[in-house]
Amino acid sequence: MVFLTLLVFLSLFVITFLAYFKWSFTYWKRKGVPYLEPTIPTGNLRVNFKTSESQFDYWRRVYKETKAKGLKHLGLYMFTNLQYVPFDIEVIHNILYKDFNYFDDRGLYYNEKDNPLTAHLVALNGKKWNNTRKKLTPVFTSKKIKMIFNIIRANTDQFIDYVGDRCKEGPVDISKAIGLLVINVTGSSAFGLDCNTFKDASSEIAKNVRNAIVISKFEFFKMIFGIQSPRIAQFLRLDYMSKDVSNFFSTLVKDTVNYRKTNQVSRDDFMQMLINLMDSNEFTLEDVMAQAFLFFVAGFETMTHTTAFTLYELCRNVDIQSKLREEVCQVLSKNNGEITYENLGEMQYMDEVISEALRMYPTIPIITRKCVKDYKVPKLDIVIEKDTFVVIPTVGLHYDPEYFHNPNTFDPSRFSDENNIKPTTYLPFGSGPRNCIGKRFGLLVVKSVLAVLLKNYEFSLVDGFKGPLKFNATHITLTLDETLWLNVKKL
Ligand code: HEM
């Protein structure tokens, strides 16, 4: 009898569960918006299960297929969350820029109370985001970034020696080498720390940066659950970051703040600017922790991989590599071979090469927003309802032949004249009030690294490797699924 009752309850539960999902998944059909067939229970979140297809490949394919059918938008589901994907560049422009007040959230999950580190600018919403963005904007001006250049410069000599030592042993794992430099630069500028990763690649800081960025499938699901039901997740005190990682970075910031205060030390770095905000009562210690941690969350993979992808294309296009090296050497020769903030600004071809690498390999392949109040889409007969997520398919736009002729060809000359690029078709740093705040700093690091590398070394692909690159299927940012070994020859 007990068994039978249990069976009835279980059957009722399964039927209700299935009916709920079935009904939820009729939303886009009822709205008359074209959609991709969802699967119970994950909806269209297949990209994270189908391990062979990365975010990059998935969104490129979906964009191409949808555009080929002449469709202007698409409806998707992330579990039962609604995702609206616009393909029309005017609609995209309005969402990111003109009608931003309907879309000022990103809809990421954070739990400030239990883990202050998660409340960084990328994740914050509403008023708190607005206030924090205003306070952080002055930290990223050209003047402040120029000040940080000394920190970048101080680390590049050791980097060149490290690459020099590695290349004596054979091909070099170039992403790893660049990643170590980025950890040193970020650790020094945002935490005031001498990371010294070239001497100890498995140091505590290097280990914790990796653990902070690479999250397990279980942590990923906790994050998705937090996005789906933030209030329940906060009630359950759900955290998608390991305790070791959050303790490590929190202690690091506390110790640095204490040290500087006790010893009255002041440095020209990001950490000092954050401490100054705390001294003027604009930031709490928790804010300082979160926003310092942000540099690793938002900057580590983006800067490392942008540099590595650019080098990869320079190997495939040796004429472009030579032309860029010529520019680097010619500009540096005016200053005894020294790299300065000013002479990096003179490298115009360098800008074109990096812009083209970011077109082909946008390290963040999609931009996301969350609708905060119902929005009638001009031109289209549809209302995006509050709480719907909007996905802008950056990578699709970047490979659309309507906007970029021969999109599979690495051609920096497309960026020789800004007017060649149609507005809103090129979004490696996003757009509008929530665009990338670290763009100047990120580009400065990428440029500095490429300049010192090209001045000192020649790069080529290892025998037998012709590409294309394979990307990781579970990562949100564009990361490699294989080691990028390059032959490095001292010049
Ligand atoms: C080449 C390097 C980088 C690339 C390609 C890149 C790309 C992006 C993209 C695509 C976005 C989303 C923009 C949007 O939603 O409209 C973003 C946001 C952001 N990035 Fe970067 N980024 C880079 C480096 C950095 C660095 C070094 C920092 C340092 C702190 C940083 C901090 C941020 C922050 C805080 C946001 C969120 C801004 C907000 O929500 O207000 N990024 N980045």
Image (spheres, helix red, strand yellow):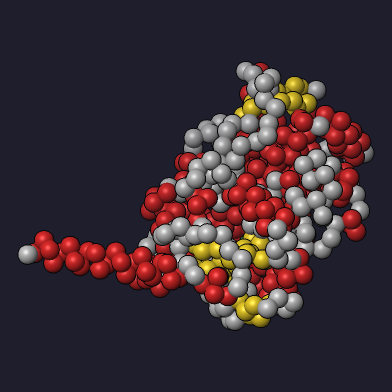
Instruction: Please state which of residues 42 and 436 is positioned toward the viewer in this rendering.
Output: 42
User: Is 112 left or right of 409, judged from the image as shown?
Assistant: left
Residue in view at x 34 percent, y 66 percent: 17
User: Is 12 left or right of 182, judged from the image as shown?
Assistant: left
Instruction: Please state which of residues 482 and 241 is positioned toward the viewer in this rendering.
Output: 482
Q: Quadrant of residue 332?
A: top right
Residue in view at x 73 percent, y 78 percent: 378
The x and y percentages for residue 362 are: 69, 50
Residue in view at x 66 percent, y 62 percent: 392
Does any portion of residue 334 appear in the rendered image?
A: yes
- For the N terminus, the image quarter is bottom left
The x and y percentages for residue 216 are: 43, 47
Q: In the image, is residue 28 above or below residue 218?
A: below
The x and y percentages for residue 320 are: 85, 34
The x and y percentages for residue 388 are: 55, 72
Q: Which quarter holds ligand 1?
A: bottom right
Q: Quadrant of residue 22?
A: bottom left
- For the C terminus, the image quarter is top right
Instruction: Please state which of residues 105 and 82 is positioned toward the viewer in this rendering.
Output: 82
User: Is 239 left or right of 203, judged from the image as shown?
Assistant: left
